[in-house]
Amino acid sequence: MARDFRRGDKRLTPLSLFSQSSLTDIVLLLLIFFLLTSSFVTNFGIQVNIPKAESGAVTQAEYISVAITNDGEFYVEGELTARGSLAGAIREARNTKPEGTIVLRADKDATVDDAVRVLNIGKALNLRLVMATEQGSL
């Protein structure tokens, strides 16, 4: 025999207040997680098809990024730089990173003359030079 322990004919009403504090905590933790993990991603922003090499070297944290596209455009630290002001842009980047290394990211289809221009500027400024490649077999 089942008994109804409710007094009278009162119906149970659902809670009218919903606490969103736990949902806010979860969203905050996710936000912190994505902010921390996104700072570790290095994004150059310039699409360059770099050649492949069998061996590789790890660069220091203080590097000067120079990219050459297949159209012959130069990017120093992610900013489009004219051919004539390339030396000035690299010199300015060296002032912020005095012990830096030039990391040259030249497209496979870029001309050798463009790469040699950057290498000559780096040699004149006494900077170490590294050519960025993808690891793979030839």
Image: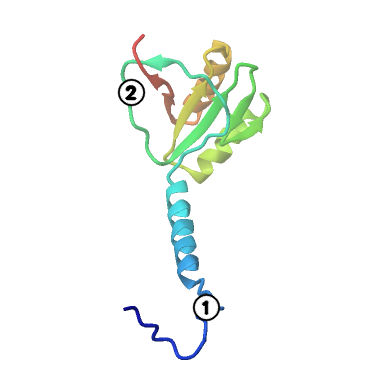
Residue drawn at (51%, 45%) of the image:
96
- Secondary element type, mark 1: loop
- Spot the residue most to the front: 1
**Mark 2 surroundings within 10 Å by alpha-carbon count, few (fewer than 14), some (14 through 19), many (20 or more):** some
- Secondary element type, mark 2: loop
Task: Identify which amino acid the numbered label 1 is placed on.
Answer: Leu
Give the mark nearest the N terminus, 1 or 2.
Answer: 1
**Quadrant of the drawing holding the N terminus:** bottom left
Identify whether 91 is placed above or below 68. Answer: below
**Mark 1 surroundings within 10 Å by alpha-carbon count, few (fewer than 14), some (14 through 19), many (20 or more):** few
Q: Is residue 62 left or right of residue 58?
A: right
Of 65 and 90, nearer the camera is 65
Residue that badge 1 annotates = 15
Image location of residue 66, percent across then percent down:
54, 29
Task: Identify which amino acid the numbered label 2 is placed on.
Answer: Gly
Residue drawn at (58%, 35%) of the image:
78
Identify whether 18 is placed above or below 127. Answer: below
Residue that badge 2 annotates = 56
Q: Is residue 37 left or right of residue 110?
A: left
